[in-house]
Image (spheres, grey):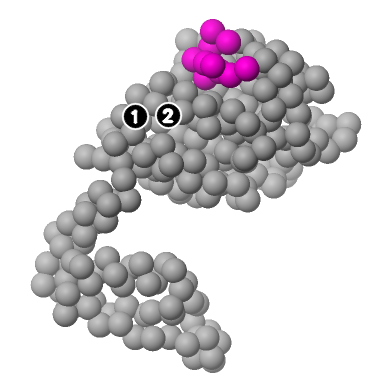
Amino acid sequence: MQEQILILDFGSQFTQLIARRLREMNVYCEIHPFNKIPELTPDIKGVILSGSPHSVRQENPLNPNLDNIKGKLPLLGICYGAQLLAHFYGGEVGKSNSREYGRANLSFVEDNNPLFKEISNESQVWMSHADTILKVPANYNIIASTHDVKVAGFAINNEQTWGIQFHPEVYHSTEGATLLQNFVKGICGCKGNWTSDSFIDVTVKELKEKLGNDKVVLGLSGGVDSSVAAVLLHKAIGANLHCILLTTDYCVKTNLKMY
């Protein structure tokens, strides 16, 4: 069973970049919508909550049930994810005096915390948020700050749960890859032995087991997703795959979605 990190997506433009950073570390991960949490199987070693263009203060905020995750699996909230872990568990999130967007530098780092291992003082990070954490719950410790943001990072006592206000996945966070590696390898214990080749082998094997001698019809648009699906299916079932090329004009006329 391939170990993995689960990424819950709250609509951030950077969510795919989180996955890319983890895969560059040879760590397998999957992105799922925040409101469609998959079964938490033993191969899931940790969970990351993405950022979001939404606010925890809005009407009907994005607030999934984390009862089976928080306190049970290593958990890292990024930006909106951190605000969620503060706001809905006894802290307070409010509107920033001005939208904080761009480069910042850490002015305080609790360097004995495993998430910030080998992260430098004054390390450059990337901020992108309109809300800010005004108050953390009583059992939370502030472990990082910038000159303008007091709660740039926190950890929960007696729990493997962390939140960071900045985005370690973007290039402008100069030691962001180190922080993510601290989480997925140091804290979650992922070995980092996944490769794209192993993903193909595992996927083809699973398709063979699920489909057997069944015939499959695939609507092929020529896009990346359907083309990759076609190649994997062909490797698994060969001549039992029948592809139909769907042109843009046909899809528009029939109101058929192209992927």
Residue indicated by mark 1 = 190
Q: Is residue 142 magenta?
A: no
Q: Is residue 227 visible?
A: yes
Left or right: residue 21 compared with residue 59: left
Residue indicated by mark 2 = 184
Q: Which residues are magenta?
A: 111-120
Q: Is residue 115 magenta?
A: yes
Residue at (63, 50) in percent of width and height: 13
Locate residue 15, reporting x and y percent: 55, 46
* Image-quadrant location for residue 205: bottom left
Locate residue 160, reporting x and y percent: 46, 18
Locate residue 98, reporting x and y percent: 87, 35
Residue at (11, 72) in percent of width and height: 213
Left or right: residue 128 compared with residue 229: right
Q: Is residue 134 visible?
A: no
Left or right: residue 46 compared with residue 89: left
Under mark 2, the amino acid is Val
Reply above or below: 71 against 233.
Answer: above
Reply above or below: 193 against 137.
Answer: below
Reply above or below: 129 against 183.
Answer: below
Residue at (18, 66) in percent of width and height: 236
Labels 2 & 1 near each other (Cβ < 8 A) = yes
